[in-house]
Each structure stands twice: as structure tokens, then as C-alpha cells.
Image: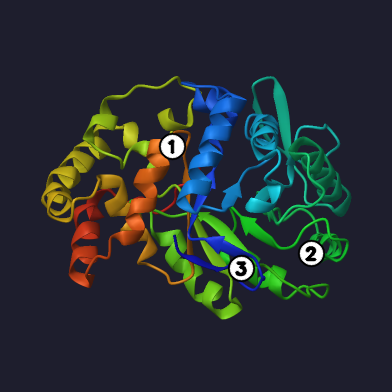
Amino acid sequence: MEYKNLGNSDLRVSTVALGTWGLGGGSVWSDKNSTPAEAARLLDACKDKGINYIDTAPVYGTGASEELLAAALEGRRQDFILQTKCSLNWRGEGGNFHYARDGYTVNNDTRPAAIRRDVEDSLRRLRTDYLDCLIVHYVCKSFPVEETVEALEGLIREGKIRAYGLSNSQPTDLEEYQNAPAKLRGVSVVQEFFSILSPFHGRDYFPLCEKYNTSFQTYGVLEEGFLTGPEFLNRRFAKTDIRARIPWVEEKYQEGLRRAFAAWEPLCRARGCSFAQLVEAWALAQFPNMSLLVGMRKPENLEDTVGCLELKLSPEELAALEQTVKSIQVEVLDK
């Protein structure tokens, strides 16, 4: 495993991070609800492979993901860098409507009182007295950035969190957070969608991440499974499932993906790697300070992902991989 500092913080994190959106289940991941025993086995595999960085959020299964992790972390909290999020809550205390799902109405609220309540709720669900990193789940323009930053910096001073970051944001948001009057530590990580099928947002972000020594954490590098191989294209999902609502279910995109897999297969054979490892290695090569956040529920998937770290592709191979999917790349893809 490779390790690096998380942006401007002193947190030493594994390059591969475990994403736990799917762990929470619910209607957006309609094929499986995880158990505490399965979550514990997943963390066993993380420990075995050197993955110490775990990402979750309150709304992943409306608390389910955090609670499952709490049970799995029992007795080994100190072994992991634990990252959760704030701003999205279902308490009915105001903010902007974000979505209604599974009987809950979720609002987006970045006011200081809401952030502090989010942190206290997550500390309770996760059964811990501190969070290593707190991510603003959806950056919101409705409330003053300087007040949000002041709250985040205050949580660092109190020892409730050790670092903070942004998600589902724009480069201009990073500028605003970094230039806020209350900023002392600043933004350590931005967590944004990025894949070979939708690379544009990340590439817009990279120069500012470099300027501010901010890690870029990619999610969606496997496009919810659609980049793991041609057999995945045959799967069908419930209408509420996230995998039924992204472009890759449409035939025009699936034709392009089938062509890409056919073109990539000789390289996979030559390098002894999977399709997933190929696109993960491509992503890691795009920016030096990249964190690879991959959602995984099975230990065998985790083992396959870690293998991408041994795969070093040439500039020619990297360019050829992307050229294959140029015709189906999507400019904006907000999941």
C-alpha cells in the first residue's frame, strides 16, 4: 500500500480509500443490505491490505452505514482514518430541500448550528469521540461561507475533527473556502466525481488543488460497476437504484462501452490485470495528489482494487485508453 498526507493535514492516509455508500443499502443500492458481520469482514480485509482510510456519511442508508461501521470498528478505531460528512440531514430543522427517499426528507444545511449537530449525531452513531476528517457533503451557496468555515475551524480547535474538506463542489468553492477570514487549517481534501468516462470536472479542479496543497479524492472511478467488465452491462436495477439513473444504462453508451472493453482486453491480458484495475490505474496517473475512493462491499473486490497500485501505464497507454471512450464521455455527471 502507498501512503501520503491528506492535503495540508498531518493525516497519513492510504492511497486507496474504502467507500461505504453501498454499505448503507436502502433504495439506492437495492440488491443488498449489509450486516455487521459483513462490515467487520470488510474492515478485516482493509487491515490486511493496508487500507486505513474509510469514508462514510450520515445519509448513506440514513444512518445505517455509520452504525454498521461503528460495530465493525469496535476495539480498533485507532487503526483507521475515519471520514464522514455534514450538511445533509433529515432532522426537519431547515435548510434547502435536497431529496425525499425511503420515507425521509433530506435537507442541505451548512449553517454552523446544523454542522455542529451533524457532527454530534455522527459521533453518536459511530461511537467515537472524534472524526479524522469531516466533508461538507454538498456545498451550498445559500448560507455564508465564512460562517461555515468558522464552524469547521472551531471543531478542529475543540478536537472534534482533525481536518475538513468539500464534496460536490466547484473550483470556485475551494477558492472561497480557502480565502475565508476564519481559515487557519483550510480545506485538506475535495471529494469529486472523476472517471475515464467523465474526467472534465476533475481536470478543472487539479490546478487549484495543487495551488492549495489539497488532495483530490475521486469517487465514481468504476462508474458504479459499469467499468468492471462487459458482463455488468447485462444487469438490471430497480428504478430507484443509482445504477438505473446514470447514462451507462442507455444502449448508445453501452455500445461504446462494449467497444472499449474489446479494445482494452489485449492490454488486460498482457498486464495480467482486470478492467477495473486498468481504469483505476488510469485515474491515479492523472494527478499526483490523488486519493482513490472506491465503494466496496466484498473483500475480493477490495483485493482487486489494491492490485491497481502495481499497474504503471505508459503515457501512450494512458492516452489510448481514454481515446477509446472519447465519443461517450459525459461533460457533467452529478450522482
Residue annotated with mark 1: 299
Q: Is residue 303 left or right of residue 214?
A: left
Mark 1, Cα crowd under 10 Å, few <14 / some 14-19 / many 20+, is: some
How many numbered circles are shown?
3
Residue annotated with mark 3: 172
The quadrant of the picture occupied by the N terminus is bottom left
- Look at label 3 and name its amino acid: Thr
Asked if residue 196 shows in the view, the reply is no
In front: label 2 or label 3: 2
Mark 2, Cα crowd under 10 Å, few <14 / some 14-19 / many 20+, is: many
Picture coordinates of residue 334, whole percent (x, y): 50, 46
Mark 3, Cα crowd under 10 Å, few <14 / some 14-19 / many 20+, is: few
Residue annotated with mark 2: 149
In front: label 3 or label 1: 1
In front: label 1 or label 2: 1
Q: How many angstroms separate mark 2 from mark 3 (CA)?
A: 15 Å
User: Which of these two is toward me, 192 or 49?
Assistant: 49
Q: Closer to the N terminus: mark 1 or mark 2?
A: 2
> In terms of secondary structure, where does tag 1 sit?
helix
Q: Compared with residue 129, is residue 245 higher up or lower down, i.e. above or below? A: above
Q: How many angstroms separate mark 3 from mark 1 (CA)?
A: 38 Å
Q: Compared with residue 137, is residue 35 higher up or lower down, i.e. above or below? A: above
